Image: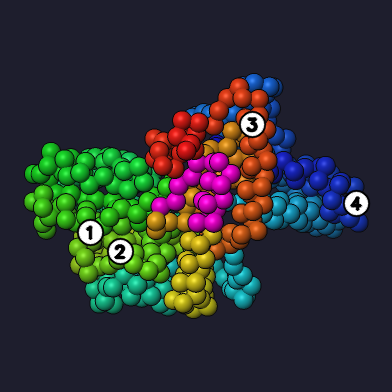
């Protein structure tokens, strides 16, 4: 898959054991067992081999494409006495950790803040903490972290200007779950409503439409990636007899574009949809950055929106996928039901929910606070401008939206380079998401390697860098046609 980690795990094989000396002092049988836990990588497809092969790997549906795996094997009869199995597993884990350290050094294309230290929470990893059911109703299961969860939800409700007695929410297992829940609430409020979403919305929005069997209309976008409200208006008027459920992006996946919430609301009300629409705001990454950007438009429940969701493992830096979903309390009864088995109410998408995630979020919110996040947002925006300017100085087309830290630029020609830096790509463009863990030194390292490699990709003149005018606009394209 383009932009994936690739075959990094292959480095954890026997050669790594021998060269790195991990497992030193182990009996040969233990080292052999550690190596045996890795299944050999499958042969590369013919189209990926040799010179002249395509630069982009195709995604083949209906076929599992594993680069490597660690086998699960039954312990030998004498394992408890020899300890070889424990030693072998320790060796594999040590090698895997080395791989994580290395891959983290070259992580730029996905919106995860890798700058965190949760050592103080290690004491809680011995407990099976489960927040099943409604966060505001204590169930019969007593090993939970609802007191942390509600504290986190209160913090987000304040940020989005919704009173304690007017909101309902929960800590989700990921950003997608937040979108699934927000759109489900909209569907329950308006059962015959039509879902509208820009073409650059996250794929989970269209997944929700399929899951709930909702009519879905894709709206065109501006060159920035922001929803085109003129096209939105035209498509609304084609269905003026049915309510509208709208997904508003607070930072699109590829370009980091922020939809104009106020203009979306104006378009709905002027089109005759007043009191007949539900807005879900997908704020996966920038939903938590926008409140700390000066002069940025507000995402607020003082406006007629129905729900907001953000990811907790992105800007906040939680080490496991999670998210926050907030909606209006008046809506939640439409999709909730009592569950006697839990002695609670079922109003969430998932049943069991990770009880550790709220603690990690609570810990970070308390450590950093409003001022801490504000400083990190300013750093990200500053470093994103630095990257965009450096790319253009090097003759590489690049774009950065005003409220974003996602820098879009020319897709590298070499797919190995893409996988090395874990870049997310789409068509002729790639992007770097500048997070708090991305330093100027890391950006310089990337830029130097990119410019050096790029010089070799196009040195013989047989091919030219792609034109990005359709993707980022003529003013941001530096191809041979648009370069000034």
Please tell me which of labels 4 and 3 falls first in the chain. Answer: 4
Residue 345, percent from left and from top: 31, 66
- Crowdedness of circle 4 by 10 Å Cα count: few (<14), some, many (20+)? few
What separation in Å lies between label 1 and label 2 (alpha carbons)? 8 Å
- Crowdedness of circle 2 by 10 Å Cα count: few (<14), some, many (20+)? some
Q: In the image shown, does 349 or 29 lie closer to the viewer?
A: 349
- Marks 4 and 2: which is nearer the front? 2
Q: In the image shown, does 451 or 319 lie closer to the viewer?
A: 451
Asked where in the image residue 279 lies, by quadrant, the reply is: bottom left
Q: Is residue 313 visible?
A: no
- Crowdedness of circle 3 by 10 Å Cα count: few (<14), some, many (20+)? some
Asked where in the image residue 328 lies, by quadrant, the reply is: bottom left
Residue 29, percent from left and from top: 87, 46
Label total for image: 4
Q: Which residues are magenta?
A: 384-401
Residue at 11%, 58% (x, y): give it: 275
Q: Which residue is mark 2?
A: 297
What separation in Å lies between label 4 and label 3 (alpha carbons)? 47 Å
Please tell me which of labels 1 and 2 falls first in the chain. Answer: 1
Would you say residue 399 sits in the magenta stretch?
Answer: yes
Compared with 342, 281 (above or below) is: above
Label 1 with label 2: CB-CB less than 8 Å: yes
Check disc 1 and report its element: helix, strand or loop.
helix
What separation in Å lies between label 1 and label 3 (alpha carbons)? 45 Å
Q: Which residue is mark 1?
A: 262
Label 1 with label 4: CB-CB less than 8 Å: no
């Amino acid at each position: 898959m383009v932009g994936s980690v690739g075959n990094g795990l292959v480095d954890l094989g026997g050669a790594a054991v021998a060269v790195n000396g991990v497992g030193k002092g182990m009996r040969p049988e233990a080292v052999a067992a550690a190596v045996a836990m890795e299944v050999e990588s499958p042969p590369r497809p013919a189209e990926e081999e040799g010179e002249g092969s395509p630069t982009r790997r195709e995604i083949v549906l209906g076929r599992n494409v594993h680069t490597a795996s660690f086998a699960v094997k039954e312990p030998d009869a004498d394992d408890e006495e020899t300890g070889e199995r424990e030693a072998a597993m320790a060796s594999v884990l040590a090698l895997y950790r080395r791989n994580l350290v290395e891959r983290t050094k070259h992580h730029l294309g996905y919106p995860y803040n890798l700058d965190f230290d949760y050592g103080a929470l290690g004491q809680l990893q011995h407990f099976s903490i489960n927040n099943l059911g409604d966060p505001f109703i204590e169930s019969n299961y007593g090993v939970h972290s609802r007191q942390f969860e509600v504290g986190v939800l209160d913090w987000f409700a304040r940020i989005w200007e919704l009173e304690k007695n007017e909101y309902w929410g929960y800590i989700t297992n990921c950003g997608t779950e937040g979108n699934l829940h927000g759109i489900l609430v909209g569907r329950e409020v308006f059962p015959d409503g039509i879902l509208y979403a820009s073409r650059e919305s996250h794929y989970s929005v269209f997944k929700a439409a399929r899951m709930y069997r909702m009519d879905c209309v894709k709206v065109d976008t501006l060159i920035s990636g922001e929803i085109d409200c003129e096209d939105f208006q035209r498509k609304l008027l084609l269905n003026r007899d049915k309510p509208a459920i709208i997904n508003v992006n607070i930072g699109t996946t590829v370009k980091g574009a922020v939809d104009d919430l106020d203009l979306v609301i104006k378009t709905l009300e002027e089109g005759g949809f007043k009191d007949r629409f539900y807005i879900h705001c997908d704020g996966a990454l920038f939903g938590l950055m926008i409140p700390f950007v000066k002069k940025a438009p507000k995402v607020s429940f003082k406006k007629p929106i129905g729900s907001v969701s953000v990811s907790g493992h992105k800007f906040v830096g939680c080490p496991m996928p999670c998210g926050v979903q907030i909606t209006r309390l008046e809506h939640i009864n439409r999709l909730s039901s009592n569950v006697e088995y839990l002695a609670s109410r079922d109003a969430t998408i998932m049943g069991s929910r990770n009880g550790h995630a709220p603690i990690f979020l609570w810990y970070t919110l308390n450590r950093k606070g409003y001022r801490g996040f504000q400083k990190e947002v300013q750093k990200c925006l500053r470093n994103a401008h630095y990257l965009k300017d450096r790319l253009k100085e090097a003759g590489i087309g690049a774009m950065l939206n005003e409220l974003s830290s996602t820098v879009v630029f020319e897709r590298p020609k070499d797919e190995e380079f893409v996988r090395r830096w874990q870049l997310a790509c789409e068509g002729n463009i790639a992007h770097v998401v500048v997070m708090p863990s991305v330093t100027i030194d890391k950006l310089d390292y990337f830029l130097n390697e990119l410019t050096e490699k790029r010089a070799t990709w196009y040195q013989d003149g047989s091919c030219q860098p792609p034109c990005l005018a359709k993707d980022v606009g003529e003013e941001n394209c530096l191809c041979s046609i648009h370069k000034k």
